Image (spheres, helix red, strand yellow):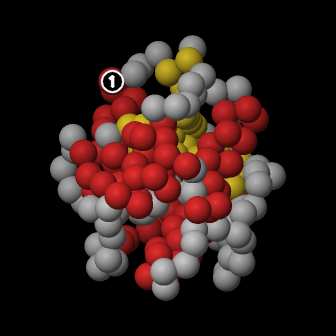
Amino acid sequence: MKKKGLFFGTFDPLHNGHVSIAKYFIKKLDLEELWLIVTPLNPFKKTQNISSELNRLEMVKSFCSNQKQIICSSVEFELSKPNYTADTLNYIVNKNPKTKFFVILGEDNLNSLHLWKDFKNILEYPICVYPRKNLKKPSNTLINHKMVRIYDAPVMDISSSLIRNLIKENKSFKDLVPEEIFDKMKKL
């Protein structure tokens, strides 16, 4: 059976922290591939000012074009909005019945997972949790769920919001994103 990781995100923008986590889980879980699933509309971020979904998708595609095991997925662009992880998982699993999928999730998202649509369906898949720096509250009881495992993945002091703020302040962010992303962002 094939093993693939699913790393969901708005990726606004994709940064070196995302890449480091993706590479960590590819190696740690011996994944054939890890899919970066670009989310056009996250139901928890409806009110936030998010970059164009097509620009975000193109940036992730440009990065993934130079990768062997990190794949850009536009699957959520084919599904109804807003995008719910449970719905996307059902769709992907139905299309790939001979694949074992692992959901890659930040510890902050684990804290709110119980609020997600059909979260119990998500917990039918292995949930691979990476730590987040400066997490404000302790993880909820899902941390003890049989399908949840915390990994000692790299903790990076990078966030997409930090990069967006640096851009607003006209400060350099070149070392925080992959070269392909930086080149694309300069053209926007």
Q: Quadrant of residue 48?
A: bottom left
Between 18 and 62, the one lying in front of the other is: 62
Is residue 181 placed above or below 51 in the rendered structure? Answer: above
Q: Which residue is drawn at 41% across and 59% down?
A: 185
Q: Residue at x 67, y 80 (%)?
A: 137
Q: Quadrant of residue 75?
A: top left
> Residue 35 at x, y = what percent?
48, 36
Q: Is residue 184 left or right of residue 158?
A: left
Q: Mark 1 points at which residue?
A: 95
User: Where's the N terminus, which quadrant?
Assistant: top right
Amino acid type of the residue tagged 1 in the rendering: Lys
> Residue 146 at x, y = what percent?
68, 46
The answer to whether residue 110 is visible is: no
Task: Give the crowd class for mark 1: few <14, some 14-19, many >=20 residues within 10 Å.
Answer: few
Is residue 75 placed above or below 164 in the rendered structure? Answer: above
User: Where's the C terminus, which quadrant?
Assistant: bottom left
Q: Is mark 1 on a helix, strand or loop?
A: helix
The answer to whether residue 23 is visible is: yes
Between 120 and 154, the one lying in front of the other is: 154
Q: In this view, does 116 lie to the left or right of 83?
A: right
Is residue 167 placed above or below 14 in the rendered structure? Answer: below
Q: Residue at x 70, y 26 (%)?
A: 30
